[in-house]
Image: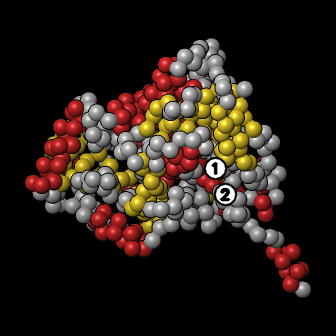
């Protein structure tokens, strides 16, 4: 019998798992995907928001500001990507300036202390490549950038190190409420490596952090009091030689449903533009289309016209989990012991640490005992990233472990040693994309055109996975369909 079952391993589920792992609790953590962060989290802008945008008095406003503060504590313990580079919300006329003034006033109410309304000259001094027609901006120094999937992985690794049991590829298909516990049934879809997870779980409490599918999970216990509507956003990612065009996160004046098209460097110093906002019917609709991407480009040019479209290395889409309530849903439901954490759209990434605190408060009010572990491990060992190391440190590492001197991915300068290291970490890996998320191998300008064969060989050597069974991500996305020699023999 588990004390708690967490459903969902996006950024919110990962934050909750990490915080709960501090206490003497028996926790099961279920994720239908092949890795943590593979839903909305992986296709996130990666912005740590300042707290000025969410309407004062909402949970979004309260938890965004608190989350921003907590990230500065978390990064020292967990060693994930974080760079507080600041942001501008730009305007071009008096009408825009009036909107910026309202954002400023709302931010002050939310407790944001470092906001400034600045003129166009101030903007151009910090951002010389932006549109010279900018006349005003809201300047927010407390905005940062992160890598959302690397952040979720850091949280998950820390949670598992401290005793949380994570089960991937395990979709919840039924939940029955008994007098003092829940019976949870899962459907397990093995990929390349089979983990022998039991399909039936008993837990005293359930935390529903299933993202886009939180309403579907709630319906399994007979709850129909909220609905999640997918809202798709499409992005364009540029090569790293375009990253230096901006030094800050740059937003345009927001619309009622979106913070607008942003132009930003990523943590790894690519250039990112997007997202748009399009309500869609299917939660798994992640297709990009030329017309919407063209609108993203044209809108972004109002901010920055000098980016080179020939340097786009990929486009992608993500779906926000917008609810029909218009605010975060974090509450114990009408079903005793079933906690909903739903409708976590922007600024959900920023709010995640504070959401975890909020959930723990709910559990405390339920009478759950929180006894801290005497052996809790707060610190997570950082990954070695060859591309970021100085010459002396790298030479010392290669002397100790020669595999760090064998480069597998030329675009991102990723070594065989880094891939070996990723495979030994707490979250189990059995897909190509899981390697990408941890090491960045395959994320450069050639988009895995060069390094794929070698990564497949490493997975074969280290995990004894037949190459034909290795998936890019989900079942059915196998990269190799057969061996050339065998195919030629069959043709004869």
Residue drawn at point x = 15 percent, y = 44 percent = 101
Using the image, determine if residue 86 lies above or below residue 288. above
Q: Nearer the viewer, residue 49 or 360?
A: 360
Rendered location of residue 78, percent (x, y): 53, 32
Residue found at x 74% / y 58%: 470
Position of the C terminus, as image quadrant, is bottom right
15, 394: nearer the viewer: 15
Q: Nearer the viewer, residue 79 or 258?
A: 258
**45 to the left or right of 101:** right
- Label 2 to label 1: alpha-carbon separation: 8 Å
Mark 1 Cα shell of 10 Å, populated few (<14), some (14-19), many (≥20) = many
Q: Is residue 299 visible?
A: yes
Q: Which mark is residue 111?
A: none
Residue 167 placement: quadrant? top right
Q: Residue at 63% of width from left, 65% of height from top?
A: 450
Looking at marks 2 and 1 on the same chain, the residue that comes earlier in the sequence is marked by: 1
- Kindly state the secondary structure of the residue where label 2 is placed: loop
Q: Position of residue 447 (x, y in %)?
A: 56, 64
Provide the residue designation for mark 1: 33
Q: Which residue is mark 2?
A: 474
Whether residues under marks 2 and 1 lie with C-beta atoms below 8 angstroms apart, the answer is yes
Which residue sits at x=47%, y=62%? Answer: 281
Q: Position of residue 242 (x, y in %)?
A: 39, 61
């Amino acid at each position: 019998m588990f004390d708690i079952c967490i459903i969902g391993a996006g950024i919110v589920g990962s934050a909750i798992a990490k915080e709960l792992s501090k206490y003497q609790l028996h926790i099961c953590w279920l994720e239908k995907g092949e890795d943590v962060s593979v839903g909305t989290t992986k296709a996130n802008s990666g912005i740590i928001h300042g707290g000025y945008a969410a309407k004062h008095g909402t949970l979004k406003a309260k938890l965004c500001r608190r989350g921003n503060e907590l990230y500065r504590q978390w990064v020292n313990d967990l060693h994930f990507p974080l760079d507080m580079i600041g942001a501008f919300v730009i305007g071009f006329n008096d009408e825009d300036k009036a909107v910026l003034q309202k954002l400023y006033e709302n931010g002050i109410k939310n407790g944001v202390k470092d906001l400034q309304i600045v003129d166009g000259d101030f903007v151009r001094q910090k951002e010389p490549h932006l549109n010279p027609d900018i006349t005003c901006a809201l300047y927010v120094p407390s905005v940062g950038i992160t890598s959302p999937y690397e952040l979720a992985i850091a949280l998950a690794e820390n949670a598992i190190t401290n005793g949380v049991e994570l089960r991937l590829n395990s979709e919840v298909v039924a939940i029955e409420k008994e007098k003092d516990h829940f019976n949870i049934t899962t459907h397990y879809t093995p990929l390349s490596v089979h983990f022998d997870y039991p399909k039936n779980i008993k837990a005293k409490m359930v935390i529903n952090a299933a993202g886009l599918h939180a309403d579907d999970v709630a319906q399994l216990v007979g709850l129909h009091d909220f609905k999640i509507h997918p809202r798709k956003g499409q992005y364009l990612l540029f090569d790293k030689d375009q990253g230096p065009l901006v030094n800050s996160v740059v937003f345009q004046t927001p619309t009622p449903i979106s913070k607008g098209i942003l132009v930003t460097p990523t943590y790894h110093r690519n250039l990112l533009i997007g997202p748009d906002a399009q309500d869609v019917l299917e939660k798994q609709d992640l297709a990009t289309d030329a017309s919407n991407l063209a609108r993203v480009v044209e809108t972004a040019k109002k901010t920055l016209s000098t980016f080179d479209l020939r340097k786009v290395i990929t486009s992608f889409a993500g779906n926000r989990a917008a609810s029909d309530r218009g605010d975060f849903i974090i509450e114990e439901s009408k079903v005793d012991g079933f906690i909903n954490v739903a409708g976590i759209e922007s600024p959900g990434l920023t709010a995640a640490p504070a959401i975890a605190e909020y959930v723990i408060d709910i559990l405390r009010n339920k009478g759950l005992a929180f006894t801290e572990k005497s052996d809790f491990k707060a610190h997570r060992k950082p990954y070695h990233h060859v591309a970021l190391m100085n010459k002396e440190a790298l030479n010392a590492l290669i002397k100790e472990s020669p595999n760090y001197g064998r480069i597998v991915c030329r675009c991102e300068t990723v070594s065989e040693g880094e891939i070996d290291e990723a495979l030994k970490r707490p979250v189990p890996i059995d897909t190509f994309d899981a390697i990408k998320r941890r090491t960045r191998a395959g994320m450069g300008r050639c988009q895995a055109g060069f390094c794929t064969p070698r990564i497949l060989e490493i997975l074969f050597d280290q995990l004894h996975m037949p190459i034909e069974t290795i998936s890019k991500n989900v079942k059915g996305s196998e990269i190799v369909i057969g061996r050339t020699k065998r195919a030629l023999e069959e043709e004869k």
